[in-house]
Amino acid sequence: MAWTWRFEKSDGTEVEPAVVPEEFTTQGDAESWIGEVWKDLLEGGADQVFLSEDGTRIYGPMSLHADQV
């Protein structure tokens, strides 16, 4: 299983992440990573993220803005 993130502007436009993620083998690893780098992603232009497992969306959009979390 591969867990991956999709990075978007608030209007749903996909953006390249400021910090390039790997493919994660567990949901916990993916969520730990986003918890460590969310500020860098936000500063790099991403407003929200989606988490997917093997191409199936698990949840999102999840805002990276602290006032909306």
Image (spheres, grey):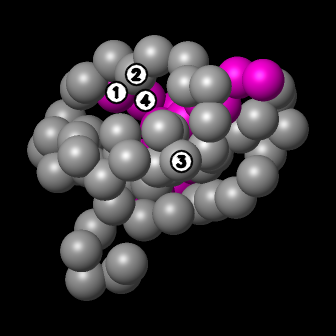
Q: Amino acid at mark 2?
A: Pro
Is label 4 in a helix, a strand or a loop? loop
Above-or-below relation of 67 to 45: below
Disc number placed over residue 17 in the picture, else none = 1
Q: Which residue is mark 4?
A: 15
Q: Nearer the viewer, mark 1 or mark 2?
A: 2
Is label 3 in a helix, a strand or a loop? helix
Q: Main secondary structure of the magenta part?
A: loop
Mark 1 vs mark 3, CA separation in Å: 20 Å
Is label 1 in a helix, a strand or a loop? loop
Mark 2 vs mark 3, CA separation in Å: 14 Å
> Is residue 50 shown left or right of residue 29?
right
Q: Amino acid at mark 3?
A: Gly
In this picture, which residue range is highlighted in magenta?
Answer: 1-17
Q: Nearer the viewer, mark 4 or mark 3?
A: 3
> Is residue 50 shown left or right of residue 31?
right
Density class for disc 4 (Cα within 10 Å; few <14, some 14-19, many ≥20) is some
Mark 4 vs mark 3, CA separation in Å: 23 Å
x and y, in percent, of residue 48 in the image? 45, 54
Disc number placed over residue 28 in the picture, else none = 3
Q: Which residue is mark 2?
A: 21
Q: Tell me which numbered mark, 1 or 3, is placed earlier along the sequence.
A: 1
Is label 2 in a helix, a strand or a loop? loop
Density class for disc 1 (Cα within 10 Å; few <14, some 14-19, many ≥20) is some
